[in-house]
Amino acid sequence: MKRVASLLCLMSVLVIPRAVIAADGVPVEVSGGYSYLHDQDASSNFPSGWTASVSAAVKSRFSVVGELGGSYQTLTTPSTGVNGHIYSFLGGARYAAYSAGKMSVFGQALVGAARSSFSADSTVSPETDLAFQPGGGVDVTLVPKWAVRVQGDFRALRVSGATTRQERVAASLVFNP
């Protein structure tokens, strides 16, 4: 089921920007890649993850961004195994702070929801929380229309009246049609 959901997300990320470009002539950027998440409060790592985003330029350096992500972990104890995942659905703004030659440095602020679920044996505990994720990164152009992105983000989740902190690093392939 995870693979089907990931495939559908990837297909929508690749198809929707084409329609936007054809309709408006707005510069659009699509990216997808690997992410690694660390939860500070639980001292827990999510080593398997993905990220996908679409952005549309509003001005030369300012873009609106939509981002989806998934992070997964499996913890094994002598008595049971615990599987966990966190899906994020975020949107916000990106600002290209510096651009020279083949390199571009950006900062972004995203807000949305993070849905986490942990299961042990047959018990599942899903929860959806408010998420705020500022971050930044570097895009390095490989060839025209293609770049590599390395980024780091800090995520704050509002969980039952308290704030949970997470950090994420990601490496993505970027397509500028």
Image: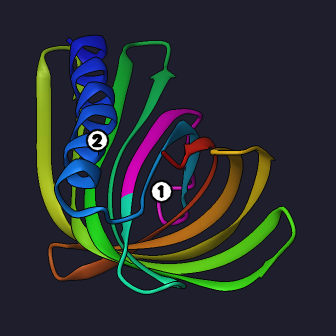
The residue segment tinted magenta is 40-54
Q: Secondary structure at mark 2?
A: helix
Residue density around tag 1, few if under 14, some if 14–19, many if 20 or more, within 10 Å: few
Q: Amino acid at mark 2?
A: Arg
- Is residue 131 among the parts visible in the rendering? no
- Is residue 170 among the parts visible in the rendering? yes
Q: Amino acid at mark 1?
A: Ala
- Horizontal side of 129 relative to 80 (left or right) equals left
Give the percent coordinates (x, y) of residue 143.
78, 41
What type of secondary structure mainly makes up the magenta span?
strand
> Disc 1 or 2, which lies upstream in sequence?
2
- The residue depicted at 84 percent of the width and 62 percent of the height is 102
- Horizontal side of 168 relative to 59 (left or right) equals right
Residue density around tag 2, few if under 14, some if 14–19, many if 20 or more, within 10 Å: few
- The residue depicted at 37 percent of the width and 14 percent of the height is 80
State the residue position of label 1.
42
Q: Is residue 80 magenta?
A: no
- Horizontal side of 128 relative to 96 (left or right) equals left
**Distance of label 1 from label 2 (alpha carbons):** 40 Å
- The residue depicted at 34 percent of the width and 32 percent of the height is 84
Is 48 rendered above or below residue 116? above
Is 83 rendered above or below residue 50? above
State the residue position of label 2.
18
- In the image, 153 versus 137, the foreground residue is 137
- The residue depicted at 40 percent of the width and 13 percent of the height is 79
Q: Secondary structure at mark 1?
A: loop
- In the image, 42 versus 68, the foreground residue is 68
